[in-house]
Amino acid sequence: MTAETIRQALAKTPFQPFQLLLDDGRVIPIKQRDSVLVSSQRALAVDPVSEAFYIIDLGHITALKVTGEPSDEQLASS
């Protein structure tokens, strides 16, 4: 996975939630635009509910899967 692919998903307006699928089978949900930071080689994702965080080497991300349509609130604010 490239940093640019993740940045493009984050930049979509309105934002659409997505998941990062990892090579070990884990799935990291990205429900808000501000819950992930991306550098050239890693991503830092935070679960706003549990406050768990993940530091992920981009080489371990096998796919990015859009999981939902934007909410009415997101549409209204865009």
Image (cartoon, rainbow, N blue to C red):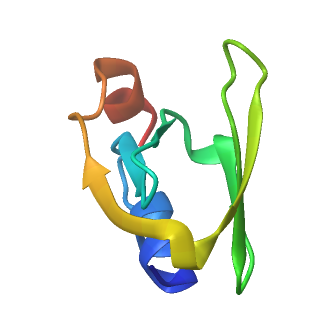
Residue 18 quadrant = top left
Is any part of residue 43 visible from this angle? Answer: yes
Residue 46, compared with residue 64, is above or below; it is above
Q: Residue at x 35, y 47 (%)?
A: 14
Q: What x and y, as percent, mark residue 57? A: 67, 71
Tell me: 58 left or right of 44: left
Indicate the quadrant containing the N terminus: top left, top right, bottom left or bottom right. Answer: bottom left
Residue 70 quadrant = top left
Q: In front: 13, or 50?
A: 50
Q: Residue at x 34, y 60 (%)?
A: 64
Give the number of callouts. Answer: 0
Indicate the quadrant containing the C terminus: top left, top right, bottom left or bottom right. Answer: top left
Residue farthest to the top, as pictured? 49
Is any part of residue 15 visible from this angle? Answer: no
Q: Residue at x 67, y 44 (%)?
A: 34
Tell me: 41 left or right of 25: right
Residue 9 quadrant = bottom left
Q: In front: 69, or 76?
A: 69
Tell me: 27 left or right of 36: left
Tell me: 58 left or right of 42: left
